């Protein structure tokens, strides 16, 4: 299946998009006049609407192929941010080794240590332990509900943004509406991505297909435990694939993205337990030693922390877009508009 995005250096630029439906090929053509950056932005948004349509139809491979074609176009019509994150070298495991100011190093190192401690505690705790320590206040009011809802969106935006700049296309996202939060319902939130096929084999080996972190609270206190994690779309259902180091690196960073985003915003996290549990299961399934797993976690947290620190403006804009329920394509456009391109 071929996609082509043709660019003519002329007054008009045709954008040809081929899509396959039941063996038939349909061609959609967009033509716009080349009148500067404004035209390029319109072309990008028109192309992202095509991406949205393919995602809505379940044509995930096609949507990803189109995004990769757009990635090769010059800005602003193209996607500069997709798979463009400047990453921390794998040998670097500490903020002290990075080129930041003294003040930034101190703040980021403190966050890095706190996040690693949180992950360690979560990996060592049982689900019941997690529920018992997540809530301290008995009197929750509307303000608490609003704060919790905002924290959920921050968490999911962290997953979304990290995935996008690392080249993992978000497929869909969801989180509970405020009314569910007010009525003590479990907070259901997730971002699903195209890719990570290796998780199919892992999920087949699990004793239960039930979402590991989806525990309904027995009273209002426990409601504050977020049931948020990454949803991962499997494209190839005919074979299982052990991840190479690049795929694994992306997975590790994406799955801690929500936790890191919460720490950057609030200094703590409530929605990371399911993510950390899946993180631990993947590393155990791949038979890493304790030291190897520890090094991978340290690097992925550091890399994700640096990415989200550099792109705080894009993260906040994405939070606003997701709060409004914008489409995947619209959210991508927001990222492309606000991303700090000095750090990609």
Image (spheres, rainbow, N blue to C red):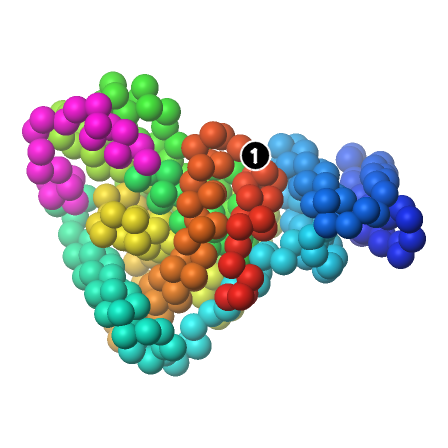
Identify which residue is drawn at 25% across, 19% down: 183
Q: How many marks?
A: 1
| Residue 282 x, y percent position in the rendering | 37, 59
Disc 1 secondary structure class: loop
Few, some or many residues within 10 Å of mark 1 (<14, 14–19, 20+)? some
In the rendered image, which residue does mark 1 sit on? Answer: 327
| Residue 92 x, y percent position in the rendering | 36, 78
Type of secondary structure dominating the magenta stretch: helix
Please state which of residues 211 and 100 is positioned toward the viewer in this rendering.
100
Please state which of residues 186 and 85 is positioned toward the viewer in this rendering.
85
Please state which of residues 165 and 220 is positioned toward the viewer in this rendering.
165
Q: Seen in the image, is 48 located left or right of residue 270?
A: right
Q: Is residue 261 magenta?
A: no
Q: Seen in the image, is 26 located left or right of residue 56?
A: right
Q: Report the quarter where the C terminus lies.
A: bottom right
- Above or below residue 128? Residue 294 is below
Which region of the structure is painted magenta?
130-150
| Residue 312 x, y percent position in the rendering | 41, 53
- Residue situated furthest right in the rendering: 10
Identify which residue is drawn at 29% across, 78% down: 96
Q: Is residue 140 magenta?
A: yes
Q: Quadrant of residue 29?
A: top right
Identify which residue is drawn at 33% across, 24% down: 178
Please state which of residues 201 and 103 is positioned toward the viewer in this rendering.
103
Is residue 126 in sight in this rendering? Answer: yes
- Above or below residue 49? Residue 246 is below
């Amino acid at each position: 299946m071929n996609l082509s995005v043709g660019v003519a250096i002329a007054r008009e630029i045709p954008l040809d998009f081929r899509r396959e439906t039941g063996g038939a090929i349909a061609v959609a053509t967009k033509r716009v006049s080349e009148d500067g950056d404004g035209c390029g932005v319109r072309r990008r948004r028109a192309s992202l609407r095509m991406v949205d349509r393919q995602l809505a139809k379940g044509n995930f491979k096609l949507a990803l192929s189109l995004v990769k074609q757009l990635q090769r176009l010059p800005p602003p019509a193209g996607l500069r941010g997709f798979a463009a994150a400047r990453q921390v070298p794998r040998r670097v495991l500490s903020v002290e080794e990075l080129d930041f100011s003294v003040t930034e190093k101190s703040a980021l190192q403190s966050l890095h240590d706190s996040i690693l401690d949180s992950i360690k505690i979560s990996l060592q705790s049982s689900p019941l332990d997690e529920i018992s320590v997540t809530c301290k206040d008995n009197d929750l009011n509307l303000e608490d509900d609003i704060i919790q809802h905002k924290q959920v969106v921050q968490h999911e935006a962290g997953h979304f943004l990290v995935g996008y700049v690392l080249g993992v296309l978000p497929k869909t996202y969801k989180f509970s509406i405020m009314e569910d939060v007010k009525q003590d319902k479990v907070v259901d939130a997730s971002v699903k991505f195209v890719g990570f096929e290796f998780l199919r084999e892992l999920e087949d080996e699990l004793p239960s297909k039930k979402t590991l972190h989806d525990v309904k609270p027995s009273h209002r206190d426990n409601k504050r435990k977020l049931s948020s994690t990454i949803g991962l779309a499997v494209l190839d259902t005919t074979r299982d694939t052990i991840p190479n180091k690049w795929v694994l690196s992306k997975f590790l960073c994406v799955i801690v993205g929500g936790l890191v985003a919460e720490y950057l915003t609030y200094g703590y996290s409530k929605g990371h337990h399911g993510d950390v549990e899946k993180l631990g299961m993947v590393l155990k399934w791949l038979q890493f030693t304790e030291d190897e797993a520890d090094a991978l976690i340290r690097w992925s947290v550091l890399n994700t922390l640096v990415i989200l620190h550099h792109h705080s403006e894009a993260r906040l804009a994405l939070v606003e877009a997701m709060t409004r329920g914008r489409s995947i394509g619209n959210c991508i456009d927001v990222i492309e508009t606000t991303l700090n391109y000095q750090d990609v």
